Image (cartoon, grey):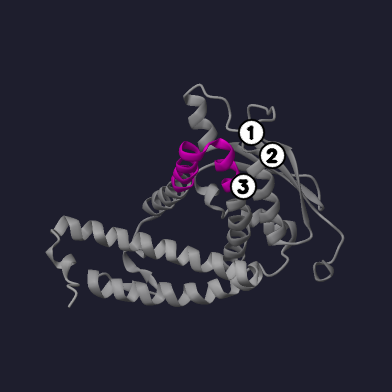
Amino acid sequence: MTDTSNHLSLSKEEKANFVVDMFTRIVVHYGLWFSEVQHQMGMEKALCVLDKATKNSVGIGMKRLSRELGFEIENGVPKALLNLDEDAMDRLMAAVGKNWLVNDGVWFQAVEFEHGMNDAKRCNDSCWAKFSPYEAHAIKKFLNLGHAPGLAGLKKALNFRMYSVINTQSIVDEGPKSFVFQMNKCRVQTARAKKNLDDYPCKSAGLVEYAYFASAMDPRIKTQCIGCPPDDHPDDWFCAWRFSLSEIAPEKI
């Protein structure tokens, strides 16, 4: 008979570390499921499946954790979150945004240090090709923007990206058919400047990130890069992108 109780001999600290490791496995397994459904069935169907799976998974998981850890749930959200004041909530949102950015960076460096910059940039750009449509989908659902919300919807959505809580950005209107989005302060580039390093050449990723995000928001929207490192740029922005609305009806695209 095989002994399956070895984990019971762990110390309290070891069990705590094991729990954290189990959460990590859940995140990886969750991502692999989405990636495989997207591979087998395409992004549109995968996003629909993701919505259903997420609603059930988060709801079930939250209830179970609330029972075990003794926290209250209100409307599907831990009550402790709802009880935070505005400043604390803003700080928490910024902390989560920073963790997301750090997560992106540690993945990049893990590939770069082992396999080189070229492979790291290749993986990074491909990752954005999948994350940007997902983030657009998540924001459209969160804001109830509908299928093709136009430039007004895109403007609103840009303020709900993960970047929006950790960077400084602005929009310059050019009329009813286009606007320019500027990343005025970029946490990554600012950190490099403090170390007297050149701008990180993020244009290849940006061309994927912004174009895929905009077209996922509304397939009529076209994206043009005005400037992005290694391009030269003025002091008041690191990258800038023009979004314009085509005349093609979304149902004909």
Q: Magenta stretch: residue 67 in it? A: no
Distance between mark 1 and mark 3 Cα atoms:
22 Å
Q: Secondary structure at mark 1?
A: loop
Q: Magenta stretch: residue 111 in it? A: yes
Q: Is residue 226 above or below residue 74?
A: above
Q: Is residue 19 visible?
A: yes
The quarter in which the C terminus is drawn is bottom right
According to the image, label 1 marks what residue? Answer: 237
Q: Is residue 207 above or below residue 116?
A: below
Span highlighted in magenta in the image: 102-124
Q: Nearer the viewer, mark 1 or mark 3?
A: 3
Q: Nearer the viewer, mark 2 or mark 3?
A: 3
Q: Secondary structure at mark 3?
A: helix
Looking at the picture, which amino acid does disc 1 mark?
Trp
Q: Are marks 2 and 1 in contact (CB under 8 Å)?
A: yes
From the viewer's side, name the closer residue of 209 and 69: 209
Mark sitting on residue 125: 3
The residue located at (57%, 47%) in the rendering is 123
Q: Secondary structure at mark 2?
A: strand
